[in-house]
């Protein structure tokens, strides 16, 4: 059962430095401020910095000064930008704050881990991905509570005994929990395969559904009701974000798409054959949906039934516990 709620600030938590105050980075900043956590940030565009500063956020357009401040205060740096923006940001982190703990909120983890490793920053890196969002972008779309009860995936591919890495892992978990999110651990490949199926594939299918309906003309759009609205909701997301998400997870998405295409081809063949039968697919799909509801809850508000595992970071066998949690999709608590 999901019992997470924003946790009160731990004793003198280290500051968090968020680079990129769009929907996700900006909403994180809002939640951390709400939870009385020290947080400051950087954003490329002046208009966002002005808007965030007007809302009371400690934010700058000076990346070098922000990173030097992060290094002085041993802040946890959060990369809140899309993948194409990462190389130049990581160059700056490697030059000005190489010893800070480092995490990110990017929707795919493989490319981020490679880039972080190439920049020599893996020793303090713990990947993150909050499974929450809206179809809107930018500071104006940010809100408190966006991550409440959402899953925040925390990776551990480069887990090591080094106390600095363990401490960064704990900081990332505590930061996620401070927003009201629940933490599910996963390694990069498992994460990217899972999100291909439950996030990126639905985006591609929603685009295809929207296009197919639109090609049916004005009457089809006039008749469309809630099933069409639900099935195509994510096609309302900014196209450049969907494109970046999907193109940055090509291999896993191709695997998932192949499975879907096989199913759709079977459905088409069954319907094209006057003696064909769609029964197997409709029963299998219904059963699969029930299994999802049994785990995630029947409605968005219902508590989840994910298993829960308590972990003590750094204790003997704790990384094996994380692997096990990944296998069963468990959320974790830290003591
Ligand atoms: P967003 O609202 O469009 O914000 C993008 C942010 O990245 C802005 O701060 C933008 O700065 C900055 N940025 C973009 N290109 C840049 C560049 N070349 N150099 C420096 N900064 C750049 O996007 P978002 O939804 O917050 O997405 C941010 C990250 O969160 C992405 O990696 C995405 O995969 C991940 N994510 C998104 C969702 C979702 O549902 N949207 C969910 C989970 C994770 P400017 O203001 O200067 O443009």
Image (tube, rainbow, N blue to C red):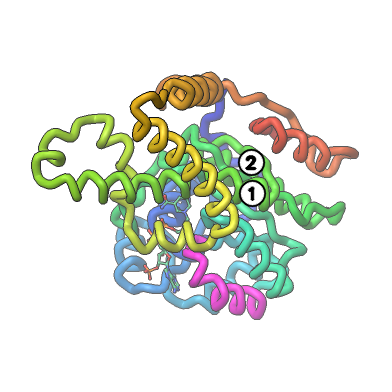
Could you tell me if residue 10 is visible in this image? yes
Residue 82 among those drawn in magenta: yes
Left or right: 5 as drawn, with respect to 231:
right
Q: Is residue 135 visible?
A: no
Query: Callout 2 environment at 10 Å: few (<14), some (14 to 19), or many (20+)?
Result: few
Q: Position of residue 72 (x, y in %)?
A: 65, 69
- Kindly report which numbered mark, 2 or 1, lies closer to the viewer in this rendering: 1
Q: In front here: 142 or 153? A: 153
Mark 1 residue element: helix
Is residue 274 rendered to the left or right of residue 2? left
Residue 172 badge: 1
Q: Which residues are magenta?
A: 80-96
Which comes sooner in the sequence, label 2 or label 1? 2
Question: Residue at horizontal 61%, vertical 78%?
Answer: 91
User: Magenta span: helix, strand or loop, mainly?
Assistant: helix
Q: What is the quadrant of the C terminus in the image? A: top right
Residue 118 located left or right of residue 5: right
**Residue 197 inside the magenta-drawn segment:** no
Q: Provide the residue designation for mark 2.
A: 10
Which residue corresponds to the image point at 72% horizontal and 35% vertical from the top-left?
327
Instruction: Give ligand 1's quarter of the image.
Output: bottom left
Residue 110 drawn at (x, y percent): 63, 59
* Label 2 with label 1: CB-CB less than 8 Å: no
Residue beneath the point at 65% across and 80% down:
95
């Amino acid at each position: 059962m999901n019992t997470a709620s924003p946790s009160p600030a731990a004793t003198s938590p280290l500051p968090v430095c968020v680079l990129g105050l769009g929907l996700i980075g900006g909403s994180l900043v809002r939640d951390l401020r709400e939870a009385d956590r020290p947080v400051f940030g950087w954003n490329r565009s002046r208009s966002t910095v002005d808007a965030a500063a007007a809302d009371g956020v400690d934010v700058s357009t000076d990346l070098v000064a922000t990173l030097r401040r992060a290094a002085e205060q041993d802040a946890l740096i959060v990369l809140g930008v899309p993948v194409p923006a990462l190389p130049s940001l990581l160059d700056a982190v490697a030059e000005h704050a190489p010893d800070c703990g480092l995490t990110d909120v990017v929707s795919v983890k493989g490319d981020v881990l490679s880039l972080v490793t190439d920049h020599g920053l893996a020793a303090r890196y713990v990947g993150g991905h909050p499974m929450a969002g809206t179809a809107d972008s930018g500071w104006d779309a940010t809100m408190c509570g966006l991550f409440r009860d959402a899953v925040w995936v925390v990776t551990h591919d480069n887990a090591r005994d080094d106390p600095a890495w363990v401490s960064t892992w704990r900081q990332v978990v505590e930061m996620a929990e401070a927003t009201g999110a629940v933490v599910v651990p996963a390694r990069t490949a498992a994460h990217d395969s899972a999100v291909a199926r439950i996030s990126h594939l639905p985006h591609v299918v929603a685009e295809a559904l929207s296009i197919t309906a639109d090609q049916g003309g004005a009457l089809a759009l006039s008749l469309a009701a809630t099933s069409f609205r639900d099935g195509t909701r994510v096609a309302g997301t900014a196209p450049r974000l969907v494109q970046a998400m999907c193109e940055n997870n090509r291999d896993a998405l191709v695997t998932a798409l192949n499975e879907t295409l096989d199913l759709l081809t079977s459905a088409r063949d069954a319907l094209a054959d006057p003696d064909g039968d769609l029964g197997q697919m409709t029963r299998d799909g219904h059963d699969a949906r029930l299994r999802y509801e049994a785990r995630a809850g029947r409605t968005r508000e219902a508590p989840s039934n994910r298993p829960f595992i308590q972990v003590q970071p750094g204790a003997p066998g704790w990384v094996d516990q994380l692997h096990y949690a990944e296998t069963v999709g468990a959320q974790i608590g830290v003591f």
